[in-house]
């Protein structure tokens, strides 16, 4: 009985370990058609003059359109401090042919394209008849601090949600340098003519938040001043009591002997 029990436990442990190793090797399996075919949070703007064009929304989502006309594949990953490279999480994959035809992820696969996920990355590979096209994706990314690796080289653009800005240092930051800011339909659009490596970082703020920040700073200043005045008053009261009790106040006094 004991041997059978031990053997059963060993079989269960082997299954658990095997399943874990398989999940590691496959990265949890390829991305599902359901994920790739999901509806984007808003319509993709394929009519862009940039090699990478990001649209950020106040709800914490982003869309991006990549020019892949001179590529046969695209590697998507995110660099983490402790776990190394990890697959980029995205959804709502779309591919646009040069003639304007747009297909979703499952149709992309049916026509010879590949979307394969590993423990380290997602590979998008294009079929031979997919030259000169464009890829669009959606994902999660806060406009208050948006960071993305540069998967393609060339010109970039990041459009902020309405009411957001990067103008004031410290609360606003853009990297790399050499960018310009345009206004398109009441929204700030940050553009780079050439980005060749590394990542882009956009830290923005909602303009109405400045009023809140100023109010918090003002209240903090008032509290600090009031606390200082109260402390000094208590100190003076303590000094007066000590003098009434004849204990002195530890002031440097000349005792007449020069010491």
Image (cartoon, rainbow, N blue to C red):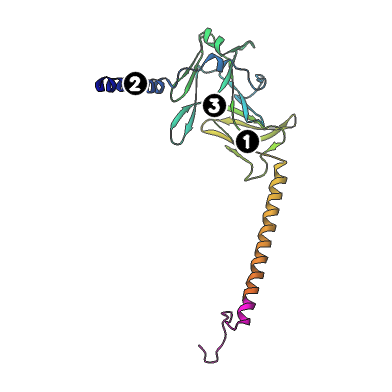
Farthest residue, direction bottom: 257
> What is the crowding at mark 1: few (fewer than 14 residues within 10 Å), some, or many (at least 20)?
some
Q: Is residue 218 above or below residue 233?
A: above
Distance (Cα) linking label 2 and label 3 = 49 Å
Boundaries of the magenta span: 239-259
| 118 vs 202, nearest the viewer | 118
> What is the crowding at mark 2: few (fewer than 14 residues within 10 Å), some, or many (at least 20)?
few
| 157 vs 238, nearest the viewer | 238
Determine the residue positioned at 75% across, 32% down. 186
Which label belongs to residue 179? Answer: 1
Question: Looking at the rendering, in which quadrant would you find the N terminus?
Answer: top left
In the image, residue 196 lies at what x, y percent?
A: 53, 30
Q: Is residue 80 left or right of residue 195?
A: left
Farthest residue, direction left: 3
Q: Image quarter for residue 93?
A: top right
In the image, residue 119 lies at what x, y percent?
A: 43, 24
Q: Is residue 214 above or below residue 241?
A: above
Which label belongs to residue 153? Answer: 3
Farthest residue, direction front: 1
Q: Earlier in the sequence, mark 2 or mark 1?
A: 2
Which label belongs to residue 12? Answer: 2
């Amino acid at each position: 009985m004991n041997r059978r029990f031990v053997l059963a436990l060993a079989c269960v442990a082997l299954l658990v370990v095997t399943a874990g190793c398989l999940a590691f090797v496959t990265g949890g399996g390829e991305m599902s058609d359901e994920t790739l075919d999901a509806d984007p949070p808003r319509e993709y703007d394929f009519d862009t003059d940039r090699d990478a064009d990001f649209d950020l929304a106040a709800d914490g989502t982003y869309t991006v359109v990549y020019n892949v006309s001179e590529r046969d594949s695209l590697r998507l990953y995110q660099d983490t401090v402790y776990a190394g490279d990890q697959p980029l999480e995205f959804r709502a994959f779309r591919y646009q042919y040069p003639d304007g035809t747009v297909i979703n992820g499952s149709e992309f696969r049916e026509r010879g394209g590949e979307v394969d996920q590993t423990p380290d990355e997602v590979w998008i590979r294009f079929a031979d008849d997919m030259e000169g096209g464009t890829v669009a994706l959606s994902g999660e990314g806060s406009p208050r601090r948006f960071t993305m690796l540069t998967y393609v080289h060339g010109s970039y653009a990041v459009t902020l949600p309405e009411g957001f800005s990067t103008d004031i240092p410290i609360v606003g930051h853009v990297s790399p340098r050499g960018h310009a800011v345009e206004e398109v339909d009441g929204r700030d659009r940050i553009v780079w003519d050439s980005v060749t490596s590394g990542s882009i970082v956009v830290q923005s703020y909602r303009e109405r938040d400045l009023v809140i920040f100023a109010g918090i700073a003002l209240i903090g200043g008032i509290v600090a001043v009031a606390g200082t005045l109260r402390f000094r008053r208590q100190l003076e009261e303590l000094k007066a009591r000590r003098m009434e009790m004849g204990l002195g106040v530890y002031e440097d006094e000349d005792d007449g002997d020069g010491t």
